[in-house]
Amino acid sequence: MKRILAIALALLLLLAACLVSCGEAKDPKQDETTPDDPNPSAESATGESETEEKQIQPDLPEMNFGGKEVHCLHWTLGEDGVGGGWIPWEEIAVEQPDGEVMSQAVYDRNGYVEEKYGVQISTEYAQANTELPNRILRAVSTNDPAYSFIVERSLDLRTMWTSGSFYNLKGEELSYLDLSKPWWNKDSLEAFTFGNVTQFASSDMLVLDKSETGVVLFSTSLQTDLGLDDYYQLARDGKWTWDALIRNSEICVSDLDGNLTMDAADRYGSCGNRAPSNYLYVGSGLHFAQVDRDGYIYSDVYSQESINLMQDIHEMILYQDFHAHSDHIPDFGLSRKFMANEIEFLFYSVKIANSFRTMETDYGILPIPKYDEEQTRYYNLVMPDGDSVLAVPISNDDPEVTGFVLEALSAKSYYTVYPSFYEVVLKGKSTRDQESREMLDLIFQNRTYDTGLVHGLGGFTNAYVTYAANHYGEVGFVSLCEEYDDIIDSALEDINKLIDDWNKQ
């Protein structure tokens, strides 16, 4: 009898241990609250590892909208919308998948939402910064409900955000939106929430904002051949800085054709067109403008610290032979030069890695370097000239349905579209080594927007880039900041008066 009791007790203890261990092996997504998960499961992109019961679900009731169309007006810079360098992936609607993982993920996401809630999701394209804003402003002025929502570059919001043309995403008209959910991008909300109003935001239904994250690509062939530093270890140790960039870039410089002039035939340490000025400025921990805790926009660009930083950037990328400013070198061919291992460091948005999938030699991916080792973190700027944010125009006569569908699409994308983009396209197809995948996690954990680049500061942000690009020799940024001092103050005063009015409502 005692033997039987002992065996029974042992079985009970074994069962209890099994239950404990099984309980501990829960899915990491179940308790996730971070909006910008930099490392979504590749299995979740295929739907194999998680059931819907384990996933975070949107707080949406069972509804059927009887086939109602939800129509998007999406920005483009090309003739036909998708397919070019600016928009390599469809975000909103796919008529038929083209065999690529992103196309299939968007198609499947839409099919799920359309069937579950009885809606039709469609999209059309309009030229960014011109046609799209004009169409929306005209629709609002004539109360034309043709467009349920828009997707526009954040660079172009400056022409629309003071017009009163969009619903507050936190307002009662869009009550089904829950901006606290993890599929809404926290950084975009911080950059585009002014006072009590959020007109624009990005969620995981969009991928172009992710693809516009600034990075540094490097040639591993040159790194090996020239005995350069272990950049990955520098980045892990927080020592991937301007000094490391300059030190290794200088070693790479070579007048390959021997004509005593650095031109398109030669090898450079680093390269980029106008983008490095912004990447390095924000990457150093400063911002052209930010939003304070009360929702007002402020800027410190005319501080001595900011002016010194602008001067340092100018001297580094324009005075030194190691940096090829491709706007000023005829027939340079930025991508061609990098693929030929004639550039060591390439400043660009991460989407360019997708176009290097056929590159014969290997490359790596790094964050934007810190200014120095005392800087506590990396800052990887989301460039506003190729990203995507969404908004709902007040001409929409059924915003409640649109808000419902946007929440459903965003929630579904969190487990499908975003993992397909991040794990399969970026990590799986656009990298060559495990270390680059590790760096992508570091980069995406430190993405940042700059409200000043979106606002424009009365034209200062454009002037900063063109001024630096078009002036050689001794350039004093003190004079540029003095020229724009009153202009910046006036521009911010105007927007902050509007924000003050929003706060009083």
Image (cartoon, rainbow, N blue to C red):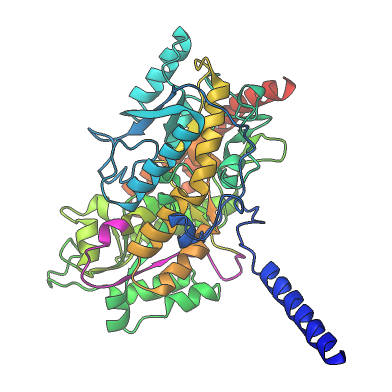
Residue at 32% of width from left, 55% of height from top? 352
Q: Quadrant of residue 247?
A: bottom left
Asked whether residue 457 is drawn in magenta, I would say no
In this picture, residue 451 sits left or right of residue 431 = right
Q: Residue furthest front?
A: 1
In this picture, residue 42 sits left or right of residue 107 = right
Q: Residue furthest top?
A: 142
Between residues 351 and 373, which one lies in front from this camera angle?
351
Between residues 297 and 178, which one lies in front from this camera angle?
178
Decide: is 68 above or below 184: above
Decide: is 265 above or below 500: below
In this picture, residue 309 sits left or right of residue 198 = left
The residue range painted magenta reads 354-376
Between residues 184 and 311, which one lies in front from this camera angle?
184
The location of residue 121, given as percent across then percent down, is 41, 30
Residue at 46% of width from left, 72% of height from top? 243
Residue 239, can we see it?
Answer: no
The location of residue 394, given as percent across then percent down, is 53, 17
Between residues 54 and 186, which one lies in front from this camera angle?
54
The location of residue 401, given as percent across then percent down, is 54, 24
Kindly report the secondary structure that dominates the magenta region of the rendered protein: loop
Q: Quadrant of residue 227?
A: bottom left
